[in-house]
Image (tube, rainbow, N blue to C red):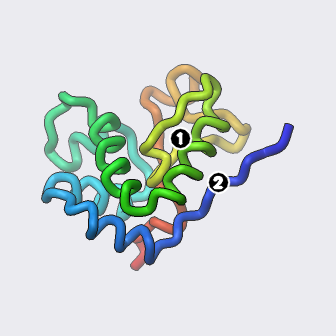
Amino acid sequence: MNKLIRPITPVAEFEKACIKANLNEKEQRIIDHIRFTGVFTQPSLTKELGLESKPPLLSFLCIICRKIGANMPDHFDKVREWSMHINEHKVKWDGELICSLAWNKDGERLTPEAGTTLFHTFVVHKELFQGLE
């Protein structure tokens, strides 16, 4: 089976796409926080940003990614194709533009379904991480 390589996000293009997306204050806080912390769960992100638990933050993240992705459509299409390829159910998750599920050293996803964590654990893509700046 051919392994599809994750499309690396061109950071300058991503930054321009974020500006063009005209994100509101809440949306920008979410993106900035994810890019700064690097690793998060839905409950941790909700708590750290003081947000309501409904609607689910991961759904909201998809909406934000669609706004950004609309301004870098070729790259977003590649990310969505990659997302479908790596998903066990062949579902595209738009949040893959910014982050993906984390894996442990044994090659298992950090998810409740895998029996490895209480919550799905996500990691920002390396090129988008800003926590060490």
Question: Residue 17: x and y, percent?
Answer: 35, 66
**Residue 94 in which image quadrant:** top left
Q: Is residue 90 above or below residue 61?
A: above
Q: Nearer the viewer, residue 125 or 36?
A: 125
Disc 1 marks a residue whose amino acid type is: Leu
Q: Secondary structure at mark 1?
A: strand
Quadrant containing the C terminus in the rendered view: bottom left
Disc 2 marks a residue whose amino acid type is: Arg
Q: Pick whichever of labels 1 and 2 is earlier in the sequence.
A: 2
Residue at the spot x=40%, y=55% of the render? 69
Query: Residue at label 2?
Result: 6
Q: Secondary structure at mark 2?
A: loop
Marks 2 and 1: in contact by CB < 8 Å? no
Query: Residue at label 1?
Result: 101
Within 10 angstroms of label 1, few (less than 14), some, or many (20 or more) residues?
A: some
Q: Is residue 58 left or right of residue 114?
A: left
Within 10 angstroms of label 2, few (less than 14), some, or many (20 or more) residues?
A: some
Q: Is residue 4 above or below residue 75?
A: above
Q: Nearer the viewer, mark 1 or mark 2?
A: 2
- Considering every residue shown, the one lying at the far right of the view is 1
Residue at the spot x=47%, y=52% of the render? 97
Question: Residue 72: x and y, percent?
Answer: 44, 62
Q: Nearer the viewer, residue 75 or 51?
A: 75
Q: Is residue 52 left or right of residue 18?
A: left
Residue at the spot x=52%, y=35% of the render? 92
